[in-house]
Structures are given as C-alpha cells and as structure tokens.
Amino acid sequence: MKILHILRREEDQLVREIIEHDKTGENLSVLLIQDGVLSKLREEDSVFASVNDVEARGLHVNCNLVDYPAICKLIIEHDKVIVW
C-alpha cells in the first residue's frame, strides 16, 4: 500500500515516529506544504515540497519541488493519504 503523509506544519516527535514506522520499502512519500516546508524531513528522497510554499518562505531546499498539478498527481497515486 502506498502511503502519502502531507505535513502542513513543522512536525512534532509523534508525527516523525509515525512516518518512521510507516517506512516499509519505497511505499511511503511525504509532501511538505504551508509551514511543513520548514520541516527537517527535506533531505530524504521520497520527500516532496510545494514550490509555491518554498518560494513564499524564501527557502532553498534539497528535495523534490512540485507544483499544484504534481501535488494532485501524488495524492491520486497513493492508496492512503494522511494530513498532519
């Protein structure tokens, strides 16, 4: 089952533990939107960030930047979506 975690704010320890628990192979992705782009999860391969939110906060990140159509595609491609 492919799982997508969408973080809207900086994650707390519980959220990080749940994401770590859900990591089973390559079936987990994380999407950072709004203040979630401030998260420390940015350096992982399966992490995506909203290009609009990154630019709005003046950040330079090392993850996959996605626009709104790509965000919609991510949501559709996953079997389970969890929003934090």
Image (spheres, rainbow, N blue to C red):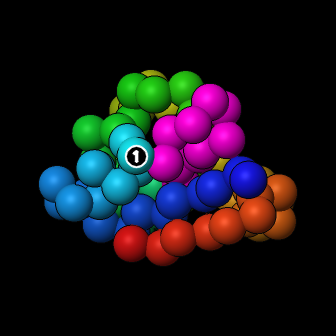
Q: Residue at x 75, y 59 (%)?
A: 78
Q: Residue at x 28, y 50 (%)?
A: 16
Residue 8 in the image: x percent, y percent?
Answer: 39, 69
**Label 1: which secondary element:** helix
Residue 59 in the image: x percent, y percent?
Answer: 33, 41
Question: Would you say 27 lies left or right of 45 here?
Answer: right
Q: Nearer the viewer, residue 17 or 9?
A: 17
Q: Nearer the viewer, residue 6 or 35?
A: 6
Residue 69 in the image: x percent, y percent?
Answer: 80, 62
Res 75 visible: yes
Which residue has dot 1 on it? 21
Q: Which residues are magenta?
A: 22-31
> Looking at the rendering, in which quadrant would you find the C terminus?
bottom left
Residue 6 in the image: x percent, y percent?
Answer: 50, 63
The quarter of the picture where residue 42 lies is top left
Does residue 29 sit above or below 56 in this rendering? above
Q: Residues within 10 Å of mark 1 (few under 14, many from 20)?
A: few
The quarter of the picture where residue 48 lies is top right
